[in-house]
Amino acid sequence: MSAEPIVRKVACPGSFDPVTNGHLDIIGRAAGLYDEVVVAVLVNRNKSSLFTVEERISMLTEVTAGYGNVRVDSFYGLLVDYCRTHEIPVIIKGLRAVSDFDYELQMAQMNRGLAGVDTVFMPTNPEYSFLASSLVKEIATYGGDVSSLLPVSVHKRLLSRLDEVRR
Ligand code: PNS
């Protein structure tokens, strides 16, 4: 009788409103380290977002299509509950700067304490150390060029959404 192979799964959670090149860098590197990467989009009813969860999933699915081991899903509630249900033992988070570390460490320790789910921190590519979806949206709203910070298809969708919002 042969033993079941161990599938190393990792969750890459976030709001992804919208996905940026910084997110994609972390997802791609995670795909090289784990057998399966589950990009988990938070359904947050308290936070207003520019894109619906379905739109965010659609953009993520499109830009990660080149990886055979990345899938996109959404979750509501506690991330550790989602991880437990889907038998995902590890969360991966990108760290842009030291300023990210305090809060990320707090969440990592809480998640480990709540459910034994570990967190692995991955330093972001320095090229993206300043990059955040919120900044991208703000800059694009006022006409700034964010084309180098987003996948081409996401950039197009962002500009057309901002156009719709302005009307
Ligand atoms: O992209 P974001 O908004 O910085 O992602 C934050 C996210 C979704 C990773 C974090 O808010 C989260 O895990 N939310 C789920 C609720 C939860 O589990 N809270 C307890 C954290 S200790």
Image (cartoon, rainbow, N blue to C red):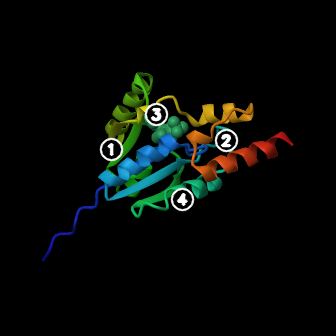
Q: How far apart are marks 4 and 1 (CA)?
A: 25 Å
Which amino acid, mark 4?
Answer: Thr
Residue at 35%, 57% (x, y): give it: 87
Q: How far apart are marks 2 and 4 (CA)?
A: 18 Å
The vertical placement of 159 against 54, above or below, is above
The vertical placement of 57 against 142, above or below, is below
Q: Quadrant of residue 37?
A: bottom left
Numbered disc 3: secondary structure: helix
Residue at 62%, 35% (x, y): give it: 136
Disc number placed over residue 49 in the picture, else none: 2
Question: Where's the C terminus, which quadrant?
Answer: top right
> Crowdedness of circle 2 by 10 Å Cα count: few (<14), some, many (20+)?
some
Q: Mark 1 points at which residue?
A: 117
Q: Name the residue under label 4.
A: 61
Q: Compare marks 2 and 4 and give the one earlier in the sequence.
A: 2
Q: Which of pointers 4 and 1 indicates the residue nearer the eye?
A: 4
Numbered disc 2: secondary structure: loop
Numbered disc 4: secondary structure: helix
Q: How far apart are marks 1 and 3 (CA)?
A: 29 Å
Disc number placed over residue 127 in the picture, else none: 3
Q: Which of pointers 1 and 2 indicates the residue nearer the eye?
A: 2
Q: Which of pointers 3 and 2 indicates the residue nearer the eye?
A: 3
* Residue 77 image point, x, y percent: 52, 45
